[in-house]
Image (cartoon, rainbow, N blue to C red):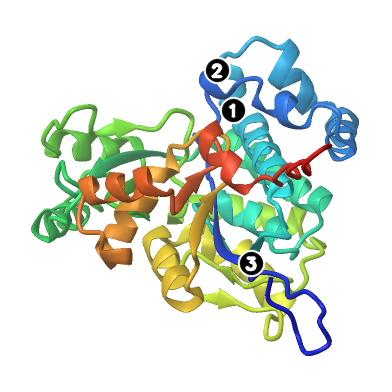
Amino acid sequence: MSTTRNSSPVSPARERLLVVCPGRGTYNAAEWGTLNRLAGDSDWLKRFDAMRHEAGMPTLSELDGETAFRQSLHGRGEHAAPLIYACAWADLLAIDRERYEVVAVTGNSMGWYIALAAAGALSPEDALHLIGTMGLMMQETLAGGQVIYPWVDETWRPDWALRRELLSLIEGIHGRKGAELYLSIDLGGMLVFGGNEAGLARLSEALPPRERFPLRLHQHAAFHTPLQEAVKREARHELASLPLRAPEVPMIDGRGHVWTPWSTDPERLWDYTLGEQLVAPYDFTAAVKVGVREFAPDRIVIPGPGATLGGATAQALIQLGWKGLDDKAEFQKLQAEEPRLICMGIPEQREWLLARAPVPSLGA
């Protein structure tokens, strides 16, 4: 073992992690029961449940255990968003901090709110309040909807001409015959469009069928578009005293902007979180690229529930050429050798990040 001059042991360098927090749509029937399995006896979940009970809502423990999964119930914003956050929080707490250092945090859409908690810009309870409040506001308003469509080919290689064609549809549809259509999320190798019913209907007619696409996202409003102006106004009033603070680790937002512990103005962070972030496109791809380029992580970690964000993240990494990746096959080969993109919703990948049991000594 290496030693310092005074013969004290040198701790091995911790691996650097970029944490990518999941957004809406990652808690489904297959994930039901995850929260109780991972954190059923935790004090923090009891506090979360107490907050929900006080607000007159079913507790997260009940939704994840006693109440049989129903998409019409569990998929509602006021339930889905807190469930996703709680599952992600359980995963984040499970990471072995003696072996791993979180060097930056980002997220997809609602994952930005989780990132605020993961980076220490909000307490866990204040993050639950934010996430629950925004989930309820979005659900009650449910202005517009979202449609998702891929622009990479079957091997996940970029088709830049197709991307340009897809984006040009927005200009051709928006503002005609009552249609509203916008780019909502730049999601790796996919584009998420947000719009009103007229805009989404015309978009779906214009998009060529491709496997399960175009895909309308269930119980999703037109997030990150001007259709959320009313929600923005209400949120800024309802959450005027949200106690945001400078993060403990850098955060990368939906523009690719980095909020650092030493330069963050909490008022500006509040203004972005409850302002531009709600009504302007969310560039998840840019966030991932900035995270990789600026913070040089050894691994990229996506907390659960589920693993649906893994494909979009991998597609962003292929566009970047991270570790020589240029298509889906190369990514799968790298993952088979040693997972560099770890989805904690996949049990065998989650094990990579947990504290290792001590090896028993000989004769023990």
- Counting residues from the start of the chain, the first of labels 3 and 1 encountered is 3
Q: Residue furthest front?
A: 363
Q: In the structure shown, which secondary structural element does the residue marked by tag 2 occupy? A: helix
Q: Residue 266: x percent and y percent?
A: 73, 75
Residue corresponding to mark 1:
76
Q: Residue at x 14, y 46 (%)?
A: 153
Numbered disc 3: secondary structure: loop
The residue that disc 2 covers is: 72
Mark closer to the observer (2, 3): 3
Q: Residues within 10 Å of mark 1 (few under 14, many from 20)?
A: many
Q: Quadrant of the C terminus?
A: top right
Tell which residue pokes out farthest to the bottom in this image. Answer: 5
Q: Which residue is mark 3?
A: 14
Question: Is 277 on the left-hand or right-hand side of 62?
Answer: left
- The residue lying toward the viewer, choosing from 308 and 194, is 308
Give above or below for 315 relative to 56: below
Q: Residue 194, how many percent across, how many down? A: 36, 46
Q: Is residue 53 left or right of residue 239?
A: right
Residue in the image at 33% along x and 54% along y: 188
